[in-house]
Amino acid sequence: MKDEADFQWLKKHAKNEITIKRINAFEKKWKSVMSEGRIFKSKRHIQLNIGGYKIWLREGGGCSSMDTYTEIFKYNRHMLHQEFCGETDKVIVDAGANEGYYTLKIKQNNPKCRVLAIEPNPLAFKILKKNIDTNKLKNVQLINKMLGHKCGKTSFELVDEISAIGSRNIQKRPWLEESRIKKIIVWGITLCKLCQEYELKTIDILKLDVEGDEMEILISAKNFVRNIRKIVVEYHSKELRKELIKFLTKNDFKLVHEERGVCGDLYFINALL
């Protein structure tokens, strides 16, 4: 999976000159980030008119947002298997919704489906809400909580300028200085409690992109997992990949597609539904 923005592709899909101008500015910043390690801290919200949507993002985190947008809208991240495009599905849970790009793409594929978008990072959640509201998407429920193994207050780590990175314990990266990681308190919710509160008897697609908490979420919901038709889950280590495959295949899921590498998505379909 590509992990960086394709600025030429982004400009090709821009709908007006101001969007092209802003993408050019992000491209210039991205080069500074890559060559000099510069950090841009502006929290100002700006809008891009691109593809079929008006997209909000934070100016300081725009490079990261463009990376994620490119991954999902150009390279179909989380949707590389035909059964995971959402076109005929009714209920989709987007855990680790970030600024909303997966939810936007799913609703583009199937405007009638119901989406529950869960995002604990308060900075990302503000953008997520603006993206859903601005584009007047219906039947999308936004939940500013962390999907995890317990309910109640819990610690959460984030990086201001990179909304795509966040979890209970952010994984170490050679380029990420520890001083940039902030710890906050958020409200946690289990998958079982989520389904109870929002009256979900079944889930058609569960998308998990939660940077390390995947197994805890699934184990805590082991009595509900059988009611999920499809799961696409991102792994960040070979050990986690093995644990996910072992747990889900033991619970009657079939691995139908995977991205091989240090990290990537695993696609599972429930063999009993």
Image (cartoon, grey):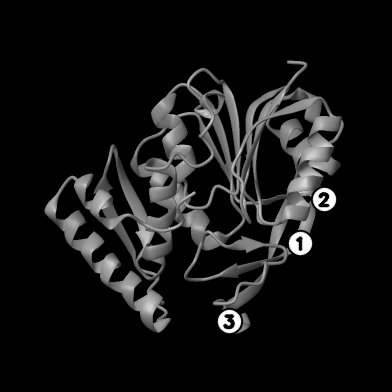
Give the residue number, with chain letter if any, for mark 3: 177
The residue nearer to you, when weighing 125 against 259, is 259
Marks 1/2: CA distance? 9 Å
Q: Is residue 30 visible?
A: yes
| Disc 2 residue type (three-letter) | Lys
* Residue at image coords 51%, 34%: 80
Nearest to the observer: residue 259 or residue 73: 259
- Where disc 2 sits, the SS reads loop
Residue 38: % across, % down: 40, 81
Which of labels 2 and 3 is toward the front?
Answer: 3
Asked whether the beta carbons under mark 1 and mark 3 sit within 8 Å of each other, the answer is no
Residue at image mark 1? 154
Q: Position of residue 169 (x, y in %)?
A: 72, 66
Residue 181 x/y as whole percent: 61, 76
On the question of residue 130 being in view, the answer is: no
Mark 1 or mark 3, which has the lower sequence index? 1
Q: Quadrant of the C terminus?
A: top right
Say which mark, if any, is on residue 59: none
Whether residue 234 sits left or right of residue 73 in the image: it is: right
Asked which secondary structure carries label 1, the reply is strand
Report the residue marked by disc 2: 150
Q: Are marks 1 and 2 in contact (CB under 8 Å)?
A: yes
Residue 81 point in image, percent of width and height: 54, 29
Vertical order, 29 against 260 (above or below): below
Residue drawn at x 20%, y 55% is 19
Q: Is residue 27 left or right of residue 108?
A: left
Secondary structure of the residue carrying tag 3 is loop
User: How many C-alpha atoms fall within 10 Å of the one at disc 1: few (<14), some, or many (≥20)?
Assistant: some
Mark 2–mark 3 distance (CA, rounded to whole Å):
29 Å
Q: Is residue 143 left or right of residue 24?
A: right
| Labels 2 and 3: the sequence-earlier one | 2
Residue found 51% across the figure and 17% down from its top:
88
